[in-house]
Image (cartoon, rainbow, N blue to C red):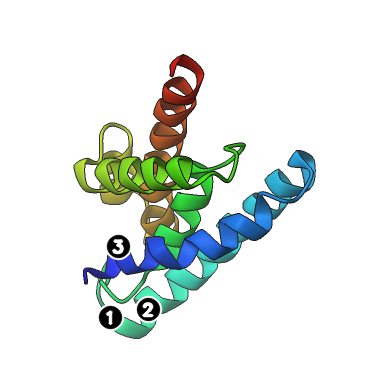
Amino acid sequence: MAPGTAGSLIGIPLYLVFSAMPWPLWLTTMVALTCLGWYVADEAEKRFGRKDDRRIVIDEIVGLQWGLFLIAPAALHLLWGFILFRLFDVVKPFPARFFQDRLPGGLGIVADDWAAGIYANVVLQILIHFT
């Protein structure tokens, strides 16, 4: 299994915990997790000696959280959120690729997945609203 997909799957139980929180606490927790992810990714990149090494998956965990933020924890929502996040993480529409290529260290590693998560969330919110 690809490391990005595995990292995203690891993020699902975390989402289930977060989604039970009141939304202000959920948002605060996600911002803290994003900052932690930035730090961990930065340190891991230094340790591995490679830019955005495949072994770094905290960015996928963080990105999936943004992809599912304020989404009700239903099986179909999880499935579509996961698929959409992985799609946007692979395709990297602007500004995701820009973030990955231009931002240094852990910030660049996490920011492209954060952007992919935001894209996934917007599309998922629209799908839920209109179906």
Nearer to us in this view, 124 or 45: 124
Residue to which mark 2 is pinned: 46
Q: Are the residues at dot 3 and dot 1 in contact (C-beta closer than 8 Å)?
A: no
Please give the name of the residue rendered at 58% of the width and 46% of the height, measured from the top-left corner: 73
> Can residue 95 be seen in this snapshot?
yes
Q: Of discs 3 and 2, which sits in the foreground?
A: 3
Nearer to us in this view, 75 or 33: 75
Q: Quadrant of the C terminus?
A: top left
Q: Are the residues at dot 2 and dot 1 in contact (C-beta closer than 8 Å)?
A: yes
Report crowding for label 3: few under 14, some 14 to 19, many 20 or more residues within 10 A (C-alpha): some
Name the amino acid, label 2: Lys
Residue to which mark 1 is pinned: 49
Please give the name of the residue rendered at 46% of the width and 61% of the height, measured from the top-left corner: 61
First in sequence: mark 3 vs mark 1:
3
Which element type, helix, strand or loop, lies under badge 1? loop
> Can residue 52 be seen in this snapshot?
no
Q: Position of residue 1 (x, y in %)?
A: 21, 72
Q: Which numbered marker is on residue 5?
A: 3
Nearer to us in this view, 131 or 125: 131
Image quarter for residue 45?
bottom left
Name the amino acid, label 1: Gly
Please give the name of the residue rendered at 69% of the width and 44% of the height, measured from the top-left corner: 27
Report crowding for label 2: few under 14, some 14 to 19, many 20 or more residues within 10 A (C-alpha): some
Mark pair 3, 2: CA separation: 23 Å
Q: Position of residue 31 (x, y in %)?
A: 64, 50
Horizontally, residue 117 falls left or right of residue 6, namely right
Q: How many marks?
A: 3
Residue 87 lies, with reference to residue 16, above or below; the image says: above
Mark pair 3, 1: CA separation: 22 Å
